[in-house]
Amino acid sequence: MVGCRNDVEKDFAERGDAMFRDFAERHRPITDTPSYFDGWACFEEQREALARKSAKAPRDPSPPRALAQPEPAPYVPPPKPTPYVPPPRPTSYIAPPKVGRNDPCPCGSGKN
């Protein structure tokens, strides 16, 4: 890999400007995008569909007529919003009293 890098650096030192000119000639910017993509196969279906569509509908040479505008609906004010009512507060949990060590059994057996 080091040898390749040295070759590139040597080539650049000898003909640096010529390398940039060669690159610029091979990689020109795209100025006419539709003609650039004209031969691409992925756009063939779209091109055929467009051709079928234009063949089906003959163009009307007369200028388009203005369509009749429907009469606007009368203004109806929006309903007034209902005032905010906060939800009821949940009641806090109250734990039952704990059974102590010397209390009778809560099952009703009477044992301590």
Image: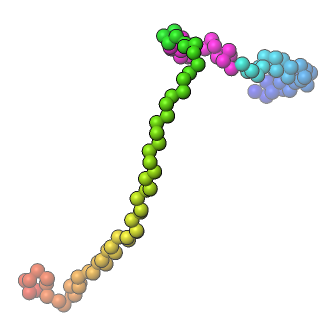
What x and y, as percent, mark residue 91?
A: 30, 77
Q: Name the residue furthest right.
A: 14
3 relative position to 74: left or right: right
| 61 shown above or below 73 | above
5 relative position to 78: left or right: right
Q: Quadrant of the N terminus?
A: top right
Q: Name the residue furthest top.
A: 55
Q: Residue at x 37, y 70 (%)?
A: 85
| 47 shown above or below 91 | above
Q: Name the residue furthest left.
A: 109
What x and y, as percent, mark residue 56?
A: 48, 10
What x and y, as percent, mark residue 24?
A: 82, 20
Front one among 68 and 55 = 68
89 relative position to 78: left or right: left
Magenta residues span 33-54
Which secondary structure dominates the residues rendered in magenta?
Answer: helix
39 relative position to 91: left or right: right
| Coloring scheme used | rainbow
Q: Quadrant of the C terminus?
A: bottom left
Q: Is residue 47 visible?
A: no
Within the magenta stretch, is there residue 39? yes
Q: Residue at x 49, y 34 (%)?
A: 69
Q: Residue at x 47, y 42 (%)?
A: 72
What x and y, as percent, mark residue 40?
A: 60, 14
Q: Which image quarter: residue 16?
A: top right
Q: Is residue 92 visible?
A: yes
Front one among 45 and 96 = 45
Q: Residue at x 54, y 13 (%)?
A: 60
Q: How many marks?
A: 0
Within the magenta stretch, is there residue 97? no
Front one among 47 and 13 = 47
| 53 shown above or below 82 | above
